[in-house]
Image (tube, helix red, strand yellow):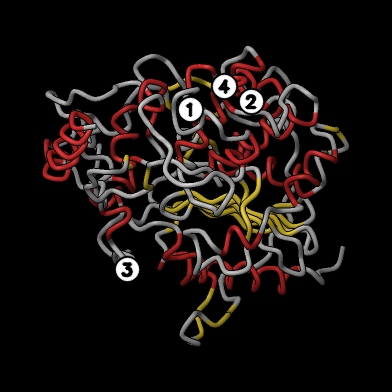
Amino acid sequence: MARRHVWTMTSVTVAAGVLTIALANAQPQLPPAENSDPVQLGLMQGFPPAPDRIVTLQNALKFPNNRWGWHNIRQLGPTAAVWRGRGGPSPLPAAPVELDRISFADESGTSTTIADWQKKTLTDAILVLHRGRVAYERYYVGMRPEEPHALWSATKSVTGLLATLLVHEGKIDRDAKVSTYLPELADTAWGDASVQQVMDMTTGVRYREAFAPSAETGTVLLYLFSNGLVPAPANYPGPRTMFKYLETLKKDGEHGKAFSYKSVDTEVLGWIVRRVSGKRMSELLSERIWSEIGAEEDAYVWVDQAGTEVTAIGLSATLRDLARFGEMLRLGGSINGKRVLPQAVVDEIRKGGDRDKFKAGDSTPPRTGYSFHNQWWIAHDPDGSFEAHGLNSQHIHINPAAELVVVKFSSHSSESRVTHALARRAYAALAAALRDRPR
């Protein structure tokens, strides 16, 4: 334990002095939208770019560099392609609606508009799909429709969907111990945890999804060192691959007691999915979903130095393809008349998890009334909406009752909780504006 204490504290202290990634959790307010557009700032423009305008992995997490970085991650490090398949893209017919001036009250009761909401939350792109038709689509900060954007933790929901599918097919036993599939983790925090506890993030693991130094718990920064999304200091002696990092984490508390958000649970789930399917995550996602929904572009996923895909935060995809993905889920597993997933798989996700365990956990407020099940956020609202969320407000919002799918990319430097309440109000305003629209 003494050795673990030394390298944990040393590495986090060094990184805090070199990196600015702590902005993602430490900054409670949104940064101003003004003077942050990467095109206007000249980031990565010119042949070569000016030295102070070059974005690298070392500084991509620093605002406003992230405003260029989030839709150019594959230029910063290793990724694996998620092939779209040989078929043509499935249609996304257009039925434009003027939504910019739709007004709603923010948390303080002040009237705002859909256009102002996008500006305030530093939106990179947004697409509103209603009844399978594109009602609204916008791109900012130099983003183009064919460019994949980082999903960050919305990746977790994709991994959870694949795991739910394998449970449905009888290839994963949700009640089995993790060590049944991953004997490598028998002596770790997950040795006596069930697969379902991992899927619902109710495991007791000595880990905190926080950037602050801690001698007794793992931190998200060490996880990022292991997967390569944050370059580790040269003298860092800890694990430099993700699976090796997972093997260092020990149990802390009781499994199944309360929800606790942690990316490492999703990495364990992704490991189980690969072990059971015998396929890389990028291959399985292409085969079972991406090629089946008629994706227009390849997606891609970040890999660590051992070539292991980062299944909690590593996926990037285009706005339009995520709209197709969300529409498939809205329709219970089908798109354009083609069955992609069994209805039962979508129903399992939509039923949600234990709301008391969620309430006892670390995500309320602002997600009061929610639950977390199979890596999806379930609102338990009258419309039956469910969502995928990622750092800096990457959102896939699915509202079955309003026949609505909203995909939103952003690149501010705060966690998505900061904008969650405002986003929910915006989505409700969109649903109200569109639900009675003539067919």
Question: Marks 1 and 3, how far apart in space?
Answer: 29 Å
On residue 290, which mark appears?
Answer: none
The part of the image, by quadrant, that contains residue 164 is: top right
Residue assigned mark 3: 29
Marked residue nearer the N-terminal end (1 or 4): 4
Task: Give the residue type that dot 3 points to.
Answer: Gln
Circles 2 and 1, Cβ within 8 Å, touching? The answer is yes
Q: Residue at x 57, y 31 (%)?
A: 269
Q: Position of residue 308 (x, y in %)?
A: 45, 19
Circles 2 and 4, Cβ within 8 Å, touching? The answer is yes
Q: Position of residue 247 (x, y in %)?
A: 40, 24
Circles 1 and 4, Cβ within 8 Å, touching? The answer is yes
Marked residue nearer the N-terminal end (1 or 3): 3
Circles 4 and 3, Cβ within 8 Å, touching? The answer is no
Task: Give the residue type that dot 4 points to.
Answer: Ser
The part of the image, by quadrant, that contains residue 224 is: top left
Question: Marks 1 and 4, how far apart in space?
Answer: 7 Å
Q: Quadrant of the N terminus?
A: top left
On residue 285, which mark appears?
Answer: 2
Task: Give the residue type that dot 1 points to.
Answer: Val
Marked residue nearer the N-terminal end (2 or 3): 3
On residue 301, which mark appears?
Answer: 1
